[in-house]
Amino acid sequence: MSEIIINQSVAILCDGNNIERSIHDRSKTKNAMINFDKLIPKLLNGRGLNRLIYFREGRAISEKFAERLHENYYGSVVPCHKSADIPLTIKATQLASKVDTIIIMSGDSDFVETVIHLKAEGVRVEIAAVKENTAKILIDEADYYHSITSDDWFVYKAPKKTTYSKKNK
């Protein structure tokens, strides 16, 4: 009997503020950042990435970060007026007929109704979040839960600035 290969199309929708807050809480530093190069392949597990969208409240969105997401994953960053909940839910609903699986990166219980709706539309829904900051009801409603751990983030260290004294000249 030959091996059956199932080709799934996956969309990853990230509630940036929720994930950032969660990893900052766990790492005890504001300089912790998701290591997408490690996390995305883990989440996809051989499945095809249809799109990656990072929803982020506020104006302080790094252009380098946005460029990297686009170059490496054809991803995009969507600035949100307030919370990412409504824009992320609208995008998830729009994508329901275009993908097999939607992975919501958030531990926010506000997404429970979104998960229920997407599943009713026939979409597999997975949650990826930091367990300690994830609502149990959200994990229970999802088809699968991916735990984001310290292996999935890194602490950014700014390059040291070189100072020159008059002696060095």
Image: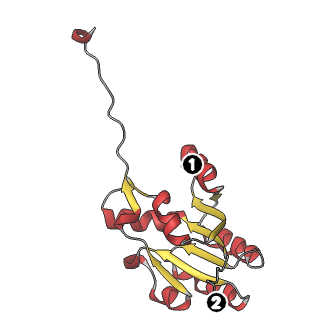
Where is residue 22? Give x, y as percent. 41, 68
The amino acid on which the numbered mark 1 sits, given as a three-letter code, is Arg
- The N terminus appears in which quarter of the rendering? bottom right
What number is the disc on residue 68?
A: 1
Horizontal arrangement in the rendering, residue 84 relative to residue 43 (left or right): right
State the residue lying farthest toward the left: 167
State the residue at coordinates (64%, 68%).
Answer: 48
Where is residue 139? Give x, y as percent. 49, 86
Q: In this view, does 74 lie above or below 128?
A: above
Q: In this view, does 28 lie above or below 123?
A: above
What number is the disc on residue 10?
A: none
State the residue lying farthest toward the front: 1
Separation (CA) of disc 1 from disc 2: 32 Å
Do labels 1 and 2 touch, CB within 8 Å?
Answer: no
The amino acid on which the numbered mark 2 sits, given as a three-letter code, is Ile
Residue of label 2: 116
How many numbered callouts? 2
Q: Which of 43 and 23 is in front in this view?
A: 43
Q: Which of 128 and 19 is in front in this view?
A: 128
State the residue at coordinates (36%, 36%).
Answer: 159
State the residue at coordinates (33%, 29%).
Answer: 161
State the residue at coordinates (43%, 65%).
Answer: 21
Horizontal arrangement in the rendering, residue 139 relative to residue 1 (left or right): left
Q: Is mark 2 on a helix, strand or loop?
A: helix
Q: Quadrant of residue 115?
A: bottom right
Crowding around mark 1 (Cα neighbors within 10 Å: few <14, some 14 to 19, many 20+) is some
Crowding around mark 2 (Cα neighbors within 10 Å: few <14, some 14 to 19, many 20+) is some
Where is residue 130? Give x, y as percent. 41, 73
Q: Which of marks 1 and 2 is in front?
A: 1
